[in-house]
């Protein structure tokens, strides 16, 4: 695939990038307000209650931010003529990426995100677990420790940043061992052991919801963080995304090697921009 110079990759954040007040820039935006109507409640009023509200809230902000960015790009169309565009999302961010690509209608995506958040929260309640992030440490050593303790690498976010998922007792043991080795360890405030077999109970009902959702051919490539390649089967990859690891480091590497050299971090926070700086140091970074 031959790309034009300054090919753009739109990056959409996942749960963990949310923050109080992130909705303020988007209040009154048509898509944002439409999303609130479809949900039938305001998730921003209950962000502290976790996954059920954080995921739809972040999705609404991300789509509104993308729509604003798109409007600005249209104003500069003469300057950007010939640019190629792709999109990728970190876990939950894939739903905003698919809306941006035209593969999912916004209304359908709001419903899917809401159902996904409920399914993941329910699975977390049925089978208790958690997640911890490692900042530093050798990937090989962290992976070996995870194998030994029955944990999984849920997120490969960037060099020196892996996230483990699984039983809380095993996570505590892993955290103790890694801290003793000088690795910084953060316990994530999530409802369960996401991106691990602990989420298996969430898959059947969510896969059924995906099967009932019309998926269009995307206008631009959407790269899957499950395969680190362009999505070949949207429904399958979204269902797999509940239990499969997030291969974000590989996704960014492969996008960059495919010729995408301008990464636009779309939505609240600058988490993805910080990760890209560590993965593809020569890439241009923009925050929408």
Image (cartoon, rainbow, N blue to C red):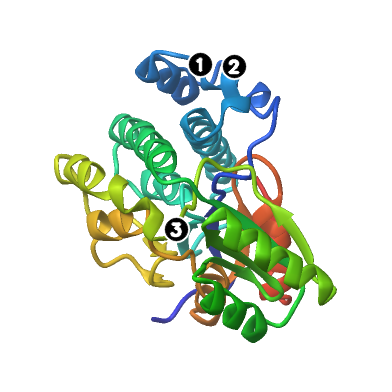
Percent across and percent down for residue 282 are: 72, 77
* Nearer to the camera, 167 or 267: 167
Quadrant, the N terminus: bottom left
* Nearer to the camera, 7 or 90: 90
The Cα–Cα distance between marks 2 and 1, rounded to whole angstroms, is 6 Å
In terms of sequence position, does the residue under pointer 3 or pointer 1 come before the other? 1
Q: Secondary structure at mark 2?
A: helix
Q: Crowding near pointer 2: few (<14 within 10 Å), some, many (20+)?
A: few
Identify which residue is drawn at 75% across, 71% down: 178
Left/right of residue 33 with respect to residue 49 in the rendered view: left
Q: Secondary structure at mark 1?
A: loop
Left/right of residue 194 with respect to residue 282 in the rendered view: left
The Cα–Cα distance between marks 3 and 1, rounded to whole angstroms, is 26 Å
Tell me the quarter of the picture where residue 160 sits.
bottom right
The Cα–Cα distance between marks 2 and 3, rounded to whole angstroms, is 26 Å
Is residue 103 in view?
no
Left/right of residue 256 with respect to residue 268 in the rendered view: left
Q: Crowding near pointer 3: few (<14 within 10 Å), some, many (20+)?
A: many
In terms of sequence position, does the residue under pointer 2 or pointer 3 come before the other? 2
Identify which residue is drawn at 32% across, 34% down: 115
Identify which residue is drawn at 51% across, 50% down: 129
Q: Which mark is residue 195?
A: 3
Q: Crowding near pointer 1: few (<14 within 10 Å), some, many (20+)?
A: some
Percent across and percent down for residue 221 are: 37, 63
Q: Is residue 97 above or below residue 263?
A: above
Q: Which mark is residue 45?
A: 2
Is residue 153 in view?
yes
Q: Which mark is residue 42?
A: 1
Please say if the residues under marks 2 and 1 sit with CB atoms less than 8 Å apart.
yes
Mark 2 or 3: in front is: 3
Please say if the residues under marks 2 and 3 sit with CB atoms less than 8 Å apart.
no
């Amino acid at each position: 695939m031959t790309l034009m110079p300054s090919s753009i990759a739109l990056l959409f954040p996942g749960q963990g990038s949310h923050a109080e007040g992130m909705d303020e820039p988007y209040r009154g935006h048509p898509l944002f307000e439409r999303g609130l109507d479809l949900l039938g409640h305001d998730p921003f009023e209950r962000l502290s209650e976790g996954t059920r509200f954080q995921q739809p809230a972040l999705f609404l902000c991300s789509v509104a931010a993308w729509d604003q960015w798109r409007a600005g790009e249209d104003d500069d169309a003469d300057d950007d003529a010939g640019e190629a565009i792709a999109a990728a999302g970190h876990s939950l961010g894939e739903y905003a990426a698919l809306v941006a690509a035209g593969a999912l209608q916004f209304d359908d995506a709001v419903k899917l995100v809401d159902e996904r958040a409920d399914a993941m929260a329910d699975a977390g309640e049925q089978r208790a677990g958690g997640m911890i992030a490692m900042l530093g440490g050798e990937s090989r050593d962290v992976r070996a420790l995870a194998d030994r303790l029955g944990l999984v690498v849920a997120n490969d976010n960037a060099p020196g940043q892996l996230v483990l998922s699984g039983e809380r007792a095993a996570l505590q043991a892993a955290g103790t061992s890694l801290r003793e080795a000088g690795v910084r360890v953060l316990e994530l405030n999530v409802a369960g052991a996401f991106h691990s077999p602990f989420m298996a109970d969430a898959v059947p009902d969510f896969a059924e919801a995906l099967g009932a959702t019309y998926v269009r051919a995307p206008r631009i490539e959407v790269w899957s963080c499950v395969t680190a390649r362009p999505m070949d089967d949207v429904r399958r990859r979204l269902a797999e995304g509940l239990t499969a690891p997030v291969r974000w480091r590989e996704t960014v590497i492969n996008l960059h090697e495919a010729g995408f050299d301008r990464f636009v971090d779309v939505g609240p926070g600058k988490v993805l921009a910080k990760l890209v700086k560590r993965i593809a140091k020569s890439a241009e970074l923009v925050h929408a």
